[in-house]
Amino acid sequence: MQARGRCWKFGDNIPTDMIVRTDMIFKPWPEILKHVLETCNPEFPANVKPGDIVVTGKHFGQSSGRAIAAKAMKQTKIGCIVAEGFARTFYRNGFEIGLPILECPGITEHVSDGDVLSVDVESGKIVNETTGYELQAKPTPPFLLDMLKAGGLIPMAERLAGERS
Amino acid sequence: MGKTFAEKALARAAGLSEVSPGEIVDAYPDLYMSHMASWRCIRTMEKLGTDKLYDVDRIAMVMDHISPAQTAKTADDQRMCREFAQKKGIKKFYDVNAGIAHIVLSEAGHIRPGMVIIGTDSHTTIYGSLGALGTGVGFSELTAAWATGKLWMKVPLSVKVVIEGPLARGVSSKDVMLKLIGDLTADGATYCSVEFHGSYTEGLSISDRMTLCNLAMELGAKNGFVRPDEVTRSYLTGRGVKPGDYSEIHPDADAAYAKTVTIDGRRLTPQIACPHAVDNVKPIEQVAGTKVNQVFIGSCANAKWEDLVEAAAILKGHKIASGVRLLVSPASKEIVERTVRDGTYSIFLEAGALITNPGCSACAGDGGVMADGEVTLSTANRNFQGRMGSYQAEIYLGSPAVAAATAIRGVITDPREFMERK
């Protein structure tokens, strides 16, 4: 699992309420996607490209554990999220829905918004191609990597169920 | 080396003799709670192509967050849950009249010391008030537990919070937690188990323990915990749960904590969380006088019977300020009944409050939203931008006593002003 793209850099403690606004939760996806993270950076929903990399400060996805926040991030087709740290419900939800996420303390010091990054999700190796700086994310437990590769918890359960029958 | 509460509870749920922080285990939770999202779990079951439930008696479903339904879609979702519960024989099913899941399940005696409980709600941490390990998960994960009975869990580090009491008059468990969240910040205990210790917690009411453990979530915690004692046992006995029906878990005296934090409750004053973050906390003197348009007394943090009585004691004999709306949403049907019987309900009506049906109400954006530029003082647990309607509105958080005093004056008011006069 490789990701390469433009870095979108965000701050600390971003709540799920700001990833997907409360009044957007029951709207159709195209409508939700026009507003993802818009209060943090209005350019993001308008210009995010498939494969781009979101870099955030600590405690990303705090507040409500609503999975739609992680799903909305996945729907933008970003390559992965690299954070100083995640709120625990967002961390679980990320793997549950198959959104590649990595924790990398120190990341925000070494990347700027607009840099080009490449990330190897499995090994956790992150390269800032703009500056040449390399970082190593915290390792992801193997069973969570399996879940990611399967596309999330439910696809993995379906696959396991298929193998049994 | 001794073990913390979370280490012992997860070892038990995983069937292991002992576990250590950082270890990932397959835990078999004792209860799976789902609310409005239950219909998503049912749909996910269909996708999984299985119909088999691991243990129907571990499933609890409460139709909160939106109650009653506001759209045909929600009505349809709720019908799906109702029919599923009936077809599968889910006995712990509570419909739209019951109230907020956390409070309803506690009152019904389903939450017991030593249990591990997962719920499709971040404030599932509240079950630590009854000595259980409660933690929030996504609905797909909950569905997986319906089918397989188990879920991966990382054994958390534990944080020990020592609260010394008693608190001064006009100061409550809400103020303790706001102070703690302000000091430690919103990620002060991310992924940790927060244990509450100290003289304040000894003999503390279950209602106040609920406020402590509920708000532990706003520190980023995995779960909260107050040691079960006579108060816990007597609460449970009152709910038809006998001591033989559960097995308490207590942390060892020499357990290892990632950090220990002490709060001197005796010197604490009322605290307010200011817009737009729960950790933006100031002593009330710094924000007193801020004009409000709405006061909301509700949520799983602070709409229990004790909270309503605390607010009513200040409101009694007063009218709310002209032009201010006071919204009161009791946490459960049982609490409504009790306030009707003891006259608390009438005090709110006479003061000019709008009392809604029991449920999550304005805290979940289910009615009671604000227009651009408006301000609400709320007893809930979150004040993020856009949580109660407009993004151009502001939410301040405080205790039920602060809410009552604020409703009377129309500006954020220190409740001790009313207490000293009496």
Image (cartoon, coloured by chain):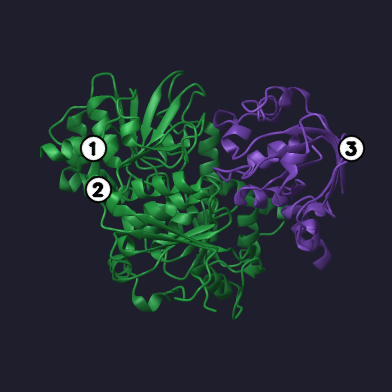
Quadrant of the drawing holding the N terminus of chain B: bottom right
Q: Residue furthest bottom?
A: B17
The answer to which of B387 and B410 lies nearer the viewer is: B410
Q: Is residue B2 left or right of residue B235?
A: right
Observer able to see residue A39: yes
Secondary element under disc 1, as helix, strand or loop, is loop
Q: Is residue B347 left or right of residue A73?
A: left
Check disc 1: other Cα within 10 Å, few if <14, some if 14-19, many if 20+. Answer: many
Mark seen at residue B415: 1
Q: Amino acid at mark 2?
A: Glu
Q: Amino acid at mark 3?
A: Glu
- For the colour green, the matching chain is B
- Please check whether the numbered discs 2 and 3 fall on a single chain: no
The picture places residue B161, in percent across and down from the top left corner, at 43, 59
Q: Name the mark nearer the viewer: 3 or 1.
A: 3
Quarter of the image holding residue A58? top right
Which residue does the numbered mark 3 point to in the structure image? A129
Q: Earlier in the sequence, mark 1 or mark 2?
A: 2
Q: Amino acid at mark 1?
A: Pro
State if disc 1 and disc 3 touch (CB < 8 Å): no
The answer to which of B384 and A32 lies nearer the viewer is: B384
Q: Name the mark nearer the viewer: 2 or 3.
A: 3
- For the colour purple, the matching chain is A
**Chain letter for the residue marked with disc 2 in the picture:** B
Q: How many marks?
A: 3
The picture places residue B169, in percent across and down from the top left corner, at 21, 47
Residue at position x 46%, y 52% in the image: B216
Q: Residue furthest left?
A: B422
**Chain letter for the residue marked with disc 3 in the picture:** A
